[in-house]
Amino acid sequence: MRIGVLASGRGSNLQALLNARQAGQIAGEFVAVGSDQPGAFALERASQAGIPEKSFPLNSYGSRENQEENILRWLQERRVELLLLAGYMRVLSSGFISRASFPILNIHPSLLPSFPGLHAQRQALAYGVKISGCTVHFVDEGLDSGPIILQEAVPVLEGDTEETLSERILQLEHRLYPEAVGLLLNGKLEKNGRTVRIKP
Ligand code: GRF
């Protein structure tokens, strides 16, 4: 399967996915890495791995709609069959999602439906939860609201800061995202409404 990735930042999840492919855990080919941020280190990681990369800065496209249109066209030109959001900091519009002919996955650093949106780890600390974690889910038209594929928890420890909690969750993300992608590629995911069953 031909895999595309959208990332806005340092791309440590992208790297974990590329490493998993190297290790034979992901039987797909990474064919496109796009970003809304021209300086994103994720793009550098992609070019180091020999993967076509392209940035789509909002100010070059005039409107969000035009920016998305160009992203979608590029992904289609690259014949992407699965799109992974890896720290992509924009919500894709319903127009993008309905026209995308491929499934879209996202990773989020909280146990959804708690703390969707930005600064999930900060939200978790402010709320005072004792457990947080991360979630891999299908992307739908809402904010971090699509059907959940995998979740795993970490404790919130006394004295945690946004940085320490984020780091603990990130370690988990790097394991869970490749695992979820592997399940999808191996045909192990069965989506029924909101529920995703993992076939044995
Ligand atoms: C991760 O915590 C991810 O869950 C969130 O944004 C962060 C991206 O980190 N959506 P990276 O760019 O993959 O290192």
Image: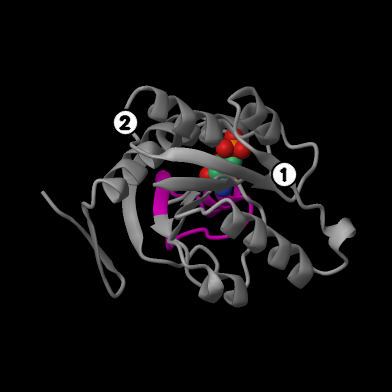
Whether the magenta-drawn stretch holds residue 146 is answered as no
Report the colour scheme.
one colour
Badge 2 or badge 1: first in the primary sequence: 2
In the figure, residue 93 lies in which quadrant?
bottom right
Q: Under tag 2, what secondary structure?
A: loop
Q: Which residue is mark 1?
A: 54
Depicted 32 relative to depicted 61: above or below: above
Q: From the image, state whether disc 2 or disc 1 is nearer to you.
A: 1
Crowd around label 1: few <14 · some 14–19 · many ≥20 (10 Å): some
- The reply to whether residue 154 is visible in this rendering is no
Residue ID at (43%, 61%) = 103
Q: Position of residue 89 (x, y in %)?
A: 66, 53
Q: Under tag 1, what secondary structure?
A: strand
The amino acid at mark 1 is Lys
Distance (Cα) linking label 2 and label 1: 26 Å
Mark on residue 25?
Answer: 2
Q: In the shown orientation, is residue 168 left or right of residue 28?
A: right
Most distant residue in the left direction? 200
Crowd around label 2: few <14 · some 14–19 · many ≥20 (10 Å): some
The amino acid at mark 2 is Gln
- The reply to whether residue 18 is visible in this rendering is yes
Whether the magenta-drawn stretch holds residue 127 is answered as yes
Q: Are marks 2 and 1 in contact (CB under 8 Å)?
A: no
* CB at disc 1 and ligand 1 closer than 8 Å: no
Question: 185 or 154, which lies in front?
Answer: 185
Q: If the picture is divided into quarters, which one holds ligand 1?
A: top right
Q: Position of residue 11 (x, y in %)?
A: 61, 35
Q: In the shown orientation, is residue 82 left or right of residue 188?
A: right
Residue ID at (81%, 52%) = 57
Q: In the shown orientation, is residue 21 left or right of residue 65?
A: left
Q: Which residues are magenta?
A: 112-136
Q: Position of residue 5 (x, y in %)?
A: 56, 46
